[in-house]
Amino acid sequence: MEDKLVTLAIRTYQRAQMIKTVLEESGIETVIHNLNLEHPEMAVGVRVRIKESDLPRALKIVEEMESAWEEETPKVKAQQILIPIDFTDQVPKAIDFAFHFADVLSAEVVFLHAYFSPAFTISSNHDLSTYSISDSELLRRIVSSANADVDNMSNLIHSRIDKGELPDVPFSFELKEGVPEDQILDYCKKHNPALVVMGTHGKKINNELIGSVTAEVMESCSVPVFAVPIQMTMESPDDIKRVAFLTNFDQKDLIAIDRAISLFTSDKLEIYFVHASEKNEPWSEIMLAGIKDYFANHYPNLITHYALLGSTDTLNLLDDYLAQQKINVLAFNTRRRNIFVRLFHPGLAYKMVLHSDTPLFVTHV
């Protein structure tokens, strides 16, 4: 009877190729099964398969390879969850979600506060006297005030951790001088956090600065962003049960969906795959059904659905659908665009931040 193939390991495409090379040099026939034959490097994970009779020898070889890789790999800094904060305008639930995700990802939380230091003169005509504050004195006062706010928030966070209201994960504060969105994007570029968690005022208070800063970061950031509206009804990260993923059938959506599933760790998570288009094409439904079946097969505990939306008023239709299905989070993948495109043609991330009270999870794969 012919020896059947078994899965030895699931690794990245690059690691799987290295394992395959070493095994075949040792006379072990190896096959790689991957997600996308045209672009295998984009696969979330590929399977290294061998004959069942070769399994004991192959396991020993792979163990030795991975032990060597661990010794060669320098110790990496812990993953970070970044929370940009403005002490005068907080969205408290953003902290709850950030600490929850940090616990899920075994990460540390970093609070980032950006402050301005404008130069100006305060003058008074009373008693013919003039009072002025120098640039250095003004900056000292701004930094001193920010440090006091940091101490107060740090004490509050420690108190909540002691009470069991927040997971016990390490946290720290960063103070930067400059424009908030610029400092957030610069920090992400240098430190590559696993996730940015930001507050937004949503559609009911859509002229507030906090909404526009969040929207700008979501449009431009190189790492995933989770936006928490102040008006949302969801009380806790544990309430995330239903996630809608808006897809355009891009191959990279599969990687983004996998990230969302890994982040939202509910026992009975439901994913709704949604495609919005004015054209009613039968192929769209076939593609949605295929995505649904793929993730249902790879995540047996996942409950999957799909829907086609078609309207010239996509935002309102999408908002209605999210309300009808009681969606907790809307997720989608987007491309970073330059400032001129964003200025004249705001993307979906920008529109949804200022339009919806549903939390958003946006990736840039």
Image: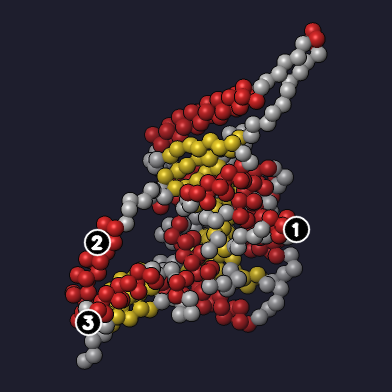
Residue visible at 52% across and 44% down in the picture: 83
Q: Earlier in the sequence, mark 1 or mark 2?
A: 2
Q: Is residue 356 visible?
A: no
- Graded by Cα atoms within 10 Å as few (under 14), some (14 to 19) or many (20 or more), the crowding at tag 3 reads few
> Which amino acid does the dot numbered 2 rest on?
Ser
Between disc 3 and disc 1, the foreground one is 3
Task: State the residue position of label 1.
Answer: 344
Q: Is residue 243 visible?
A: yes
> Which amino acid does the dot numbered 3 rest on?
Gly
Q: Separation of disc 3 and disc 2 at Cα?
A: 21 Å
Give the left or right position of residue 166, taking residue 54 as reference. Answer: right
> Which element type, helix, strand or loop, lies under badge 2?
helix
Q: Residue furthest bottom?
A: 1
- Graded by Cα atoms within 10 Å as few (under 14), some (14 to 19) or many (20 or more), the crowding at tag 1 reads few
Evaluate if marks 1 and 2 touch, with contact meaning CB atoms under 8 Å apart.
Answer: no
Q: Nearer the viewer, residue 98 or 216?
A: 216
Q: Nearer the viewer, residue 177 or 249?
A: 177
Q: Nearer the viewer, residue 218 or 114?
A: 114
Residue 99 in picture, x, y percent from top left = 45, 44
Q: Which mark is residue 67?
A: 2
Residue 358 in picture, x, y percent from top left = 60, 54
Q: Separation of disc 3 and disc 1 at Cα?
A: 60 Å
Image quadrant where one finds the N terminus: bottom left
Q: Which mark is residue 91?
A: none
Task: State the residue position of label 3.
Answer: 27
Q: Earlier in the sequence, mark 3 or mark 1?
A: 3
